[in-house]
Image (tube, helix red, strand yellow):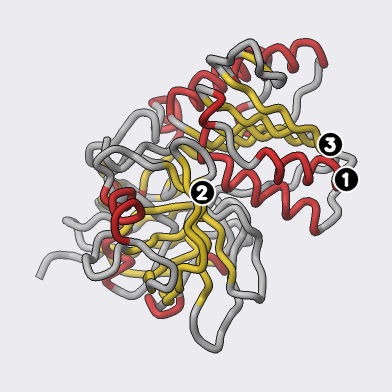
């Protein structure tokens, strides 16, 4: 029998979970084998959801994307748990609290009924789900996501809700329709109000971090607006005082959505400013014209402040925003991000 190594995962609040890992197992797989559900997403080394800092022990890394784990972070000892193979006992710190670890799949999975399916722009639909069963509580740290399964297929896709945690069983998703995307095809051809969808979550570590009264700037590309909207709605519910700005970027005017909801939120929150940015805007567009990254750069230079930044959107937008922040001198540890790619890609 091959030697088993001990893995110690230390959470942000100082708690720890222990489990064994074989020499040919990555840490995420070893944890799952023992009914320990760590924060993870793609399990292919392509995202940063399972990133942690190895503080003790030796390991080997499998293939991964440098966007998920840049070389300088790898040198510091950061690892992606889904691509990390221990070569002995290891201790790894993760950037989330103990309560985000689950110990049973049943704790994460539930059925929900489609309550609304409505186009909101040329390429985005609103999918509203109603949780089924006696337990109607939606557990959610704003910024997290859920896996939604196409009925009868076992195929699932990950989407962040725009709502906050609630006891009404409501989930509100903003989903981009992608050519040949499996979930997109289901929504376009087969999904109907009343259909039951299997959901798993909440998952992920994207979310608001406390940093005193530092202003918060939120940059969203397309349906990256959903987790951003959830975080700002949470700020409203909790009456948080930090000044905040939402930068919402799309390519064309036809792709703009949720204008009414954003304007209503801006009216209700004295601390909030909303900038809707259209890259290829026509003469009739009265909002911001140009790329969301350039408009953010302009404001940061004009205002001379260094806010906390929350980024969610396509990798190109996120990487360009990261470069702007680096040029202006916003510290790396005050930039929180989530990249996404259409599953069809």
The quarter of the picture where residue 29 lies is bottom left
The quarter of the picture where residue 110 lies is bottom left
Q: Quadrant of the C terminus?
A: top left
Q: Quadrant of the N terminus?
A: bottom left
Query: Relative to the observer, which residue lies in front, 330 or 246?
Result: 246
The residue labelled by disc 3 is: 243
The residue positioned farthest toward the bottom in the image shown: 134
Q: CA distance from mark 1 to mark 3?
A: 6 Å
Q: Residue at x 52, y 22 (%)?
A: 252
In the shown orientation, is residue 224 left or right of residue 271?
left
Q: Which mark is residue 241?
A: 1
Q: Is residue 149 above or below residue 208?
A: below
Q: Residues within 10 Å of mark 1 (few under 14, many from 20)?
A: some
- The number of discs equals 3
Q: Nearer the viewer, mark 2 or mark 3?
A: 2
Residue 202 visible? The answer is yes
The residue positioned farthest toward the front in the image shown: 284
Q: Residue at x 45, y 60 (%)?
A: 146
Residue 94 visible? The answer is no
Q: CA distance from mark 1 to mark 2?
A: 27 Å
Contact? badges 1 and 3 (CB < 8 Å)? no
**In the image, residue 339 lies at what x, y percent?**
45, 36
Q: Is residue 71 above or below residue 125?
A: above
Q: Secondary structure at mark 1?
A: loop
Q: Which mark is residue 174?
A: 2
Q: Residue at x 33, y 64 (%)?
A: 149
Query: Relative to the observer, which residue lies in front, 18 or 280?
Result: 280
Q: Which mark is residue 267?
A: none
């Amino acid at each position: 029998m091959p030697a088993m190594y001990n893995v110690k995962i230390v959470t942000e609040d100082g708690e720890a979970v222990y489990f064994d890992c074989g020499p040919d197992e990555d840490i995420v797989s070893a944890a799952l084998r023992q009914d320990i559900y760590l924060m993870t997403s793609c399990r292919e080394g392509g995202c940063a959801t399972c990133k942690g800092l190895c503080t003790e022990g030796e390991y080997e890394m499998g293939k991964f994307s440098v966007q998920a784990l840049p070389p300088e972070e790898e040198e510091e000892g950061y690892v992606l748990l889904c691509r990390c193979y221990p070569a002995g006992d290891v201790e790894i710190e993760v950037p989330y609290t103990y309560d985000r670890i689950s110990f049973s799949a049943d704790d994460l999975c539930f059925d929900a009924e489609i309550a609304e399916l409505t186009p909101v722009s040329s390429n985005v639909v609103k999918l509203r789900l109603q949780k089924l069963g006696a337990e109607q509580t939606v557990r959610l740290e704003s910024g997290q996501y859920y896996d939604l399964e196409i009925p009868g297929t076992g195929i699932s896709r990950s989407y962040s809700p725009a709502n906050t945690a609630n006891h009404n069983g409501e989930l509100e998703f903003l989903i981009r329709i992608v050519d040949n995307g499996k979930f997109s095809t289901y929504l376009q051809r087969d999904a109907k109000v009343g259909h039951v969808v299997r959901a798993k979550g909440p998952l992920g570590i994207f979310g608001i971090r406390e940093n005193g009264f530092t202003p918060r700037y939120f940059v969203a590309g397309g349906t990256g607006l959903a987790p951003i909207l959830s975080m700002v709605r949470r700020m409203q519910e909790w009456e948080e005082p930090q000044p905040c700005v939402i930068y919402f970027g799309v390519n064309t005017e036809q792709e703009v959505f949720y204008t009414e909801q954003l304007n209503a939120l801006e009216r209700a929150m004295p601390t909030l400013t909303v900038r809707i940015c259209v890259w290829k805007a026509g003469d009739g567009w009265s909002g911001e014209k140009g790329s969301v990254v350039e408009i953010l750069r302009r404001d940061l230079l004009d205002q001379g402040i260094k806010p906390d930044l929350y980024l969610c959107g396509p990798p190109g937008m996120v990487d360009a925003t990261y470069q702007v922040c680096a040029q202006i001198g916003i510290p790396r540890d005050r930039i929180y991000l989530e990249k996404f790619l259409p599953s069809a890609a």
